[in-house]
Image (spheres, grey):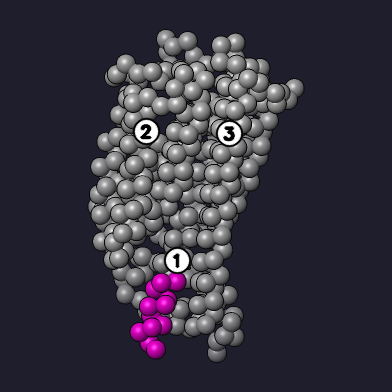
Amino acid sequence: MLDLDMTPYAAFVWPAWGVSALVLAALVARAVIASRRWKRELERLEADAPSKAVDAPRPQAAQSAVGQPESPQVARSAIGPQK
Amino acid sequence: MFGLSNPQRFMAFTGPLTPVLWAVAAVLLAVGTWLSFTVPADYQQGDTVRIMFVHVPAAVWGLGAYSALGVSSFFALVFRHALADAAARAAALPGAAFTALALFTGSLWGQPMWGTWWVWDARLTSVLVLFLFYLGYMALRASIDDEQKGARAAAVLGLVGLINLPIVKFSVDWWNTLHQPASFLTPGSSGLDTVYLPPFLTMLAAYGILFAALWLTAIRTEIRRRRVLTLRARQALEA
């Protein structure tokens, strides 16, 4: 049975749960917003220069730092089939 | 496991895993919250016992996040691995938030039970030091313009902070503290009443999986951010 009557400790229990919920929600919101922002920006850059982004050789250090583009198929499709 | 140190493989592996972690964390948080308000009040602590279900998980995963930060910093320093550096950076903010929550909720629990919001005992002080290590790590990274130098300096600080983890854990055994000793799964202790185990364990798992979801999402974001910076730099060179 749900018990929401915290008397006489309501002034301690509810702020503890409320602030925890707010902070966790803020962490989730920040993570999702940042994730979407950089994903969108990366897709835009790869669409702008698909051949360079996908095919151009990179220095070894840069490769290990950033890895390969996420979806080369999508990037290639943006410039059409290669002959 | 080491195969995942390749950013491309890491992105491929964590792509489908991350949404699952988000979903499991959401379900566990909902169930844990429900359970937390259905258990009876404690015969001594009254309803303040419900603070335990948000306080202890935050404290445990505040420590866990720092372990992740410290180990990742070690790999970043020794092997100069970019993904390890991204992992260290990604653990800092959720870890700091969890530790701040542990301090805040602990204070709210301490006032009605101990009669004080704060006391400079070994456990509370060492957790405050842990929080300051998190702040120092993030401030150091942000304060150095050269990202690589900032990452290296912060990694050294992250490693130094690992010394604090056993102090936090064993502070209640090494010193006489107002904070109670470990009472969960500790032989010889009075232990936690079994009626509180379901909400406690559910919330502990919920916070842990939520941290994993936040951490993986932040690492993936960091990998994308670095790719964007590399592409922008290349475009600037070619322009």
Q: Could you tell me residue A58's position as x and y percent? A: 35, 76
Marks 3 and 2 on same chain: no
Residue A15: give its label: 3
Q: Farthest residue in the right direction?
A: A1
Where's the C terminus of chain B, which quadrant?
bottom left
Q: Chain of mark 3?
A: A
Badge 1 or badge 2: first in the primary sequence:
2
Q: Give above or below for B118 relative to B85.
A: above
Position of B90 with respect to B136 (left or right) is right
The reply to whether the C-beta atoms of the residues labelled 3 and 1 are less than 8 Å apart is no
Q: Give the camera-side residue of A33 and A69.
A: A33
Where, by quadrant of the figure, is residue B127 drawn?
top left
> Can you tell which mark lies on residue A40?
none
Q: Which residue is mark 1?
A: B225
Q: Residue at x 63, y 46 (%)?
A: B23
Specify the segment rendered in magenta. Answer: B228-239
Q: Image point 68% across, 30% down: which residue?
A: B34
Mark 1 secondary-structure assignment? helix
Looking at the picture, which amino acid does disc 3 mark?
Pro
Nearer the viewer's eye, disc 3 or disc 2? 3
* Dot 3 crowding, Cα within 10 Å, few <14, some 14–19, many 20+: some
B140 vs B32, nearest the viewer? B140
Q: Label 2 amino acid? A: Val
